[in-house]
Image (cartoon, helix red, strand yellow):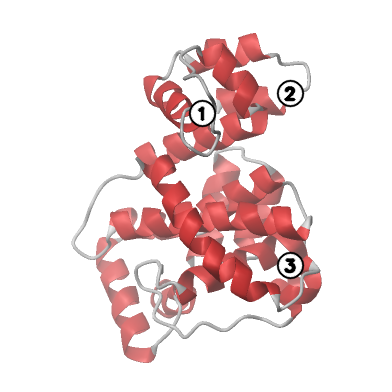
């Protein structure tokens, strides 16, 4: 949280970010892993954290810090919820959301990345706090071919969108993240339509590649207004679907 707040402060410099990063070995290691990955294509390996901060940029550092923090916060396995499948979906969704934001030029790509990463975080709240109810939700989803949020409403009278928004607000994250997660299943009435459209588009692409979250057993249908909000042509769908394969590989760097 300190890194998140510092990167949002325009008066913060790379040295100050470096002083925070060195306090957390997991974040420091992930930053060095990321900056030295093939995706940056640097000729010489980077071993200095302050140099890594300068190369990655504050927004990417924020994304890495939040990713590591959230991944470490939710690791507990239980019989009804496959954490590996969940985090693979979330990491790919984050990367795809960033890609859509870049191609559509509709919003800040790093903000889109975080929204994509965290959009289903409420499922983990349910899975860890209410494992018996989670089993019931997944059973209802499978029996009636429902998405997780509709099955959750049948069992708990709430869903992962409401719980995820509550958690992100509790963590004092960007209000745009909170709103997007809260409104992710209601594009027509969303307070900010573009982030929700990106969530729905990235989720659709993940479903086409069979990268679903546990308990999502519904057929994939994309709201036609998503195209309007993002300002992209349907002809780009083929390109985006093929690009998901690359994003799966990139997500392994995040999850490594």
Q: Choose mark 2 or mark 3, whichever is in front.
A: 2
Q: Choose mark 1 or mark 2, whichever is in front.
A: 1
Q: How many marks?
A: 3
Residue 46 pos. (x, y %): 49, 18
Which of pointers 2 and 3 lies earlier in the amino acid sequence? 2
The quarter of the rendered structure image containing the C terminus is top left
Q: Which residue sits furthest left?
A: 79
Residue that carries the numbered disc 3 in the rendered image? 190
How far apart marks 3 and 1 lie (CA) works out to 36 Å
Residue that carries the numbered disc 2 in the rendered image? 9
Q: Which residue sits at x=61%, y=63%?
A: 199
Q: Are marks 2 and 3 in contact (CB under 8 Å)?
A: no
Residue that carries the numbered disc 1 in the rendered image? 35
Residue 100 seen from this side = yes
Q: Which residue sits at x=76%, y=60%?
A: 104
How far apart marks 2 and 3 lie (CA) works out to 28 Å
Residue 209 pos. (x, y %): 44, 72
Residue 31 pos. (x, y %): 48, 27
Residue 121 seen from this side = no
Which of pointers 1 and 2 lies earlier in the amino acid sequence? 2
Classed neighbour count for the residue bearing mark 1: other residues with Cα under 10 Å, few (<14), some (14–19), many (≥20): many
Which of pointers 3 and 1 lies earlier in the amino acid sequence? 1
């Amino acid at each position: 949280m300190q890194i998140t707040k510092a990167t949002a402060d325009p008066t913060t410099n790379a040295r100050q970010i470096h002083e925070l990063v060195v306090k957390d070995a997991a974040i420091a290691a992930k930053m060095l892993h990321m900056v030295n990955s093939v995706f940056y294509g640097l000729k010489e390996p980077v071993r200095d954290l302050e140099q890594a901060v300068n190369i990655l940029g504050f927004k990417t550092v924020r994304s890495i810090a939040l990713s590591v923090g959230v991944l470490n916060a939710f690791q507990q396995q239980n019989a009804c919820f496959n954490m590996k499948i969940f985090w693979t979906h979330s990491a790919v969704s984050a990367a795809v959301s960033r890609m859509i934001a870049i191609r559509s030029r509709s919003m800040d790509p790093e903000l889109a990345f975080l929204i994509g990463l965290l959009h289903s975080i409420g499922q983990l709240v349910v899975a860890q706090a209410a494992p018996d109810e989670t089993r019931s939700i997944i059973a209802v989803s499978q029996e009636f071919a429902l998405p997780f949020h509709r099955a959750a409403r049948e069992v708990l009278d709430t869903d992962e969108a409401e719980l995820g928004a509550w958690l992100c607000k509790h963590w004092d994250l960007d209000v745009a993240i909170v709103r997007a997660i809260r409104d992710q299943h209601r594009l027509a009435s969303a307070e900010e339509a573009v982030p929700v459209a990106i969530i729905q588009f990235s989720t659709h692409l993940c479903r086409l590649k069979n990268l679903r979250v546990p308990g999502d057993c519904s057929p994939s249908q994309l709201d036609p207004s998503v195209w309007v909000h993002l300002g992209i042509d349907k002809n780009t769908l083929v390109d985006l679907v093929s690009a998901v394969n690359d994003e799966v590989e990139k997500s392994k760097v995040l999850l490594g």
